[in-house]
Image (cartoon, helix red, strand yellow):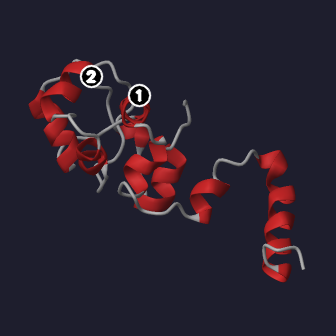
């Protein structure tokens, strides 16, 4: 799934100055170094060692370890690759550990702008009547 999570990253993690961050290792724009759940998602997949995932990324396991610890920045292509590898969304990697429930905000950000009004009406209907339609 190709879904740019940088706007979500900024809304949850704070300000980022992408213009001030240079490119690195061919991955493109590096994102801010904030707390992520990259390590938790990797460890949630049996048999996914740091060395194996790093080899698939074609980076050193030391570099992946630094990214997981927040010492070295991550970027959108890395998130896309890892989300596909771990079977989650890119936003999951930076917003919640495996097993944690999704929030309405996470779903809302994926709704196309031209459909948000309809989605809002549906949610308001649930709030008024409950889910059984009464």
- Coordinates of residue 101 in the picture (x, y in percent): 48, 63
Residue 35 relative to residue 130: left or right: left
Mark 2 to mark 1: distance in Å? 10 Å
Establish if 21 lies above or below 127: above
Assess whether mark 1 and mark 2 are in contact (beta carbons under 8 angstroms). no
Crowding around mark 2 (Cα neighbors within 10 Å: few <14, some 14 to 19, many 20+) is some
Q: Quadrant of residue 134?
A: bottom right
Front position in the image: 92 or 5: 92
Residue 14 seen: no
Residue 41 seen: yes
Count of numbered circles in the view: 2
User: Which residue does the numbered mark 1 point to in the structure image?
Assistant: 77
Which is closer to the viewer, label 2 or label 1?
2
**Residue furthest right in the image:** 134
For label 2, the SS is helix
Q: Residue at x 25, y 20 (%)?
A: 56
* N-terminal-most mark, 2 or 1: 2
User: Which residue does the numbered mark 2 point to in the structure image?
Assistant: 57
Front position in the image: 39 or 69: 39
Crowding around mark 1 (Cα neighbors within 10 Å: few <14, some 14 to 19, many 20+) is some
- Coordinates of residue 58 in the picture (x, y in percent): 22, 18
- Coordinates of residue 23 in the picture (x, y in percent): 32, 26
Q: Residue at x 46, y 51 (%)?
A: 9
Q: Quadrant of residue 116?
A: bottom right
Front position in the image: 70 or 126: 126
For label 1, the SS is helix
Establish if 47 lies above or below 129: above
């Amino acid at each position: 799934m190709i879904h740019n999570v940088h706007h979500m990253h900024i809304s949850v993690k704070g300000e980022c100055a992408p213009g001030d961050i240079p490119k690195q290792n061919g991955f493109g724009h590096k994102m801010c170094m904030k707390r992520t759940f990259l390590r938790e998602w990797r460890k949630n997949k049996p048999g996914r060692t740091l060395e194996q995932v790093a080899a698939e990324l074609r980076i050193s396991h030391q570099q992946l370890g630094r990214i997981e610890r927040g010492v070295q920045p991550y970027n959108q292509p890395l998130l896309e690759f890892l989300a596909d590898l771990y079977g989650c969304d890119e936003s999951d990697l930076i917003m919640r550990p495996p097993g944690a429930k999704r929030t309405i905000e996470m779903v809302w950000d994926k709704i196309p702008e031209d459909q948000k009004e309809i989605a809002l009406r549906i949610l308001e209907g649930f709030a008024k009547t409950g889910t059984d339609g009464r």
